[in-house]
Every structure is written in C-alpha cells, then in structure tokens.
Image: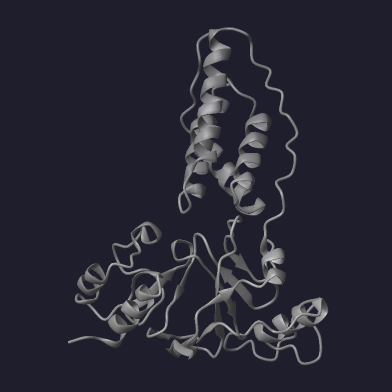
Amino acid sequence: MTSPQLRYALAAAARGWHVFPLAVHDKPPAKGFTKWEANATTDPGLIRRWWSRAPWNVGIACGPSGLVVVDLDTPKPGKEGLRPPTPWDLPGVTEGADVLAVICERAGQPLPFETFTVRTRRGGTHLYYTAPDGVRLGNTEGDEGGGLGWLIDTRAHGGYVVGPGSYVDRTDGTGPYEVLHSVPPAPLPPLLSKLLVPPPRPVREPVRLALPDTRRGAYLRTALTRELERVASAPEGQRNRTLYLAATALGQLVAGGALAEQEVTTLLEQEGVGIGLSTGETRLTVASGLKNGARRPRTVAA
C-alpha cells in the first residue's frame, strides 16, 4: 500500500529534489540517517524501499537539490503579541511574511511569491527557490549570521526542510505540510541573494609563533599546520567536531609547554570562523577542546 508520504517523496524526487526519511510525525532525520545530506536521493527504487519500512515524513536536502528555501515563520505558541525587535518593530509586522514585505518595500521590489510554496504546520510558509550560480549559500536563523530578519530562516547547503506530505505532531504545533502553489521554483530573487551572500572573510592578522629553528620547532610547526588544515577541509556537518578535536590535540601541546595558549587559540578561532562557524560557537568549541587537551599534557623533546 502506497502511503501519502511515499507519493510526495517520489513527487519531490521527480522534480530533482534529493529526499530522505524524517521521523514519523516529527522533524529530525529518521534513526540511522545521520549522514542525511550525503545519502539523500532521487532514486525511486531506493525511496520505495525506505518508505516501505514506515510512513516516514519527507526531508528535502536543499544543497544537493539546488534549492534555497525561505521559511517565513509565525510566533511560537505563547509568544503571540510580543513586539518584534528593532528594526522590525513596525505597525502590522507580526510574523516572518510581514518582515519579508518590509524588506521588499524598502528595496522597491515586489513580493517574490510566484514560486513553489508550502504551508507549514503552524501556518508559516516555505518559499522554494533555485539556488544562484557561482555562490554557495548556507543556512541562516532570523537576524543572526547574515540572516534576512525576524522570524525568517533560510535553508541551503547543509540544511533541509520538512517536505510537503509530512505531518508533524509537537507540543508547539501540530499539522500537515501542504502545497499551496505547485509551480516550478523560481530563481532566488537577486535582492535576497545579495542579502544572503556571506561577507568576505576578514583579513587575518598574522600570528608569529616563537618556535626555534630546530627539529623540535619543525615538529611543532608540522603539528600545528596539520591540525589547522584538518579544520579548513572539514566537511559540513563535521566542522564543529573537527575544530574540537584539533583544539584537543593542540591543547595537549599547550599544556606541556610546547606551544603558547594565546597563539594557538587565535589560530584556531580564525580557522573556525573562516569555515563558517559563528564566532560564539567557535570560541566555546576552542576553549572546550583546549581544556580537554590539558588533561593529557604532551612534551616535545628539544
């Protein structure tokens, strides 16, 4: 028997969107799908096998699908009527759709609603757009990290959305995800693309490591370079953990007196922010890793 979720998963795959199972009546990936972005698929046979196990909800991996999804949210239960933060504290602004209207009005642009549209379980809206060429967009949350504004999230590389045909049952809202406008996704409007393009990385201040020109110094330079390169090449979904492991490894050398803590901290924080982690997240991860490494100090012979 074909479930509604399977039909919607196959329909999404037919559009070229990469899908994977979400928990039944919930939003997290189904158990065992920790590498959902890499394993999401458009293969109808594989999709049928996955959904034959349970009526999974439908996850759509935005990056592999070439999508940018703009999530226009509504206030969570218990927070209706709260005044939005500056600069969105304006008459008539009560949800994410209103914020988008303000953004477009200020730029003299029409509302970009002529695209594939899904109504979410709490009455919000998902606007599906094709990702722009030549730029790699990530995820944003509200006003943070270069986001569009209050109650607007975006999902692109490294993110997924709950697809149509899904049904979520949670304390903060229960209901289906339903297609409102079944047309091909429009290109991401230039206005939104411009706002979402991450700013260029700041020029890094050189950190001078006072290492001797000896075998010991060469070993320490190699160890430091290896860990920084490991962080720089970490794949999405593993960046925070890779940074933590690098900080742990170098923290052992710091605790053993081989490297200066401030220099190592600065280099790790620069690398963490450089790969797209937030400043706050980076600082916490580096500090935690250095603390963990200090439990097992390493000394390096002269």
* Residue sitting nearer the eye, 56 or 103: 103
On the image, the x and y values in percent for residue 103 come to 76, 78
* Residue sitting nearer the eye, 241 or 9: 9
Give the image quarter of residue 174.
bottom left
Judged left or right of residue 51, residue 252 is: right
* Residue sitting nearer the eye, 130 or 296: 130
Judged left or right of residue 235, residue 213 is: right
On the image, the x and y values in percent for residue 105 come to 79, 82
On the image, the x and y values in percent for residue 108 come to 81, 80
* Residue sitting nearer the eye, 109 or 127: 109
Locate the N terminus by quadrant: bottom left
Picture layout, residue 107 above or below residue 235: below
Judged left or right of residue 87, residue 268 is: left
Residue at image coords 68%, 21%: 209
Whether residue 127 is visible to the viewer of this picture, yes or no, is yes
Residue at image coords 26%, 81%: 55
Residue at image coords 29%, 62%: 32
Residue at image coords 58%, 42%: 286
Locate the C terminus by quadrant: top right
On the image, the x and y values in percent for residue 298 come to 48, 22
How many numbered dots are placed on residues in this image?
Answer: 0
Give the image quarter of residue 175.
bottom left
